[in-house]
Image (spheres, rainbow, N blue to C red):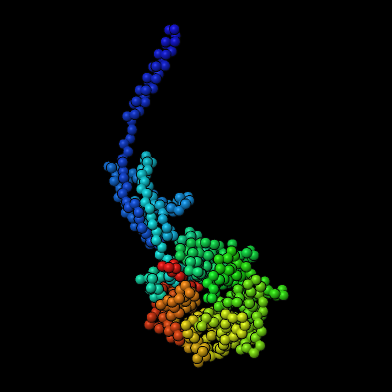
Amino acid sequence: MIKNMNIRSAVCFLLTLSGCYRDKGNYDYIHLPDIKIEAEDVVYATQFDTLKLPVTVNWDNAYEGEYEFDWRIWSNEVGGNRHRKNIASTKDLTYVVKEIPGSYSLVLTCRNKRTEVNTYKHMTLAVQGSITEGWLVLREKDGETDFDLIMTPFISQRTEKDKILYGLYESVNGEKLAGKGIKIKNYFALGRYQYVTVLTDRGGVRLSAVTMQKTFDIATLMLDRKPLKPENYFFFDYYWCLGRGNEILISDGRYYINALLGDGFTEPILTNGETYKASPYGPRRLWTFAGMIYDEAKGRFLGIDRNMVAHRLSEADGRLFDWNNMHGSLLYMEVGFKNYDYALIEDWNTRKKTLYVLNFDKKKDFDVAMYPADNCPELDKAVCYAAGMRGNVFFYATEKNIYLYDYAGTNTGKKVYTLASESEKITGMKILKPCVDRFIKSHPYDNKVLVFSTYDEIKKEGKVYMYYFNESNGALDISSEKVFGGFGKISDMEYNFAKYGS
């Protein structure tokens, strides 16, 4: 009995010591300041603009130097918090907003470096878009390919002042474009589908024209899985049926078609086991055909039917020229006046050039006119061309000069512009063509702006020049000059549609 009492006494003694120890520890603590972060709960920003967000911190007698800061951002869409991004390590935020339009969580963490205790401030960031109607510039700069967007009141009433967004692809998508730029082209259909396609010598991508966010790698849309060697891309729709249209992609001499809202590009089959070599150019004003190949191997046009079979066109007996035997190379083709297709073809033997006007918006008798271009100075040195749609307007340019070809009048070429700089060379030329069938019927600058690009090999700078011209006769208004710089070597240019309905 006495032995049991001794055991209980010992246990009680140990518990008492333990209690005293714990009690002593309860009074040995560090005072943690109750700091508070004050900032707006909802913040608004515009894509590609700089967001400056000051923050007030109530330090509660703490020393600011004991704290460090961290800003993070993520999308509020489902699953967006899995892609959190650190964007700054300062108390006040200065950040170029590259995120696409939408709602985001913006969180500032204030961390005590000694105790590692965190204080948070959560904000909602609403990003509105800044990409709208403008001029896309595909270029190579410092060994890298990307594209820029010029937004200017010179070509758009949606813009009040000049603004250039540089390096759009990498800014939006967080990756670089592989290869050297070849083509940039828009796609507008049914008033709701707006894409931009970019091709390089190593592939290509399809982007949303509103956000420039990548939607597809073009290689994944090539149904035959053959190596992609892009040469050109364009989209055409059917004026008489708004639900029809085709994307055309020419790769390594092959002609591919992807129907409007289709699943991928398919190469048509030729009848009788024939072969062909597609020109990078081709007709775009079609009705009875799904596509039209210009065969560089045999100098002929091949019609593609709805079954994706390419075949010889109807006979040309008694017509102005034989579309089944053009006997030359297609240098350029574009939709021009009266919505006809205008084709500049160089004869294989004589090297003479002829401008052919064709109407493929019918089943036969495609010839409209032909104009031997014998009286066009420096046409042999031309590097680019542009055809207007509201008059008999046809420009061609050498590296230094721009000429207006009066094909339907005097049938002669007249110099209308010369580059002032000795070190600059013209690299490309286009006419602003923003109207699309019944969805965009009119535009204040439709077919009234000539745009050309230059490159200065010494300065390693590309420029874009814009001029107004008379849409009916091509007369160039030199006094209207507008110049944009800061680009690299420009490989292509294109109009970018504003968000439809904006």
Image coordinates of residue 50 in percent, x first then y, are: 37, 60
Q: Provide residue 350's location: percent of width, then percent of height.
A: 62, 88
Q: Is residue 32 above or below residue 265?
A: above
Q: Residue furthest top?
A: 1
Q: Of 114 and 256, which appears nearest the observer?
A: 256
Q: Is residue 441 visible?
A: yes
Q: Where 335 sits versus 267, above or below?
A: below
**From what the image shows, is residue 104 above or below residue 132?**
above
What is the quadrant of the C terminus in the image? Answer: bottom left
Residue 25 percent across, percent down from the top left: 35, 28
Q: Residue at horizontal 62%, vertical 68%?
A: 266
Quarter of the image containing the N terminus?
Answer: top left
| Res 461 seen here | no
Q: Quadrant of residue 317?
A: bottom right
Residue displayed at 41% across by 63% down? 129
Q: Would you say 114 lies left or right of 411 here? A: left
Furthest residue in direction left, as rendered: 61
Where residue 448 appears, as percent x and y from the top left, is 43, 80
Rendered residue at 46%/70% (across/down): 496
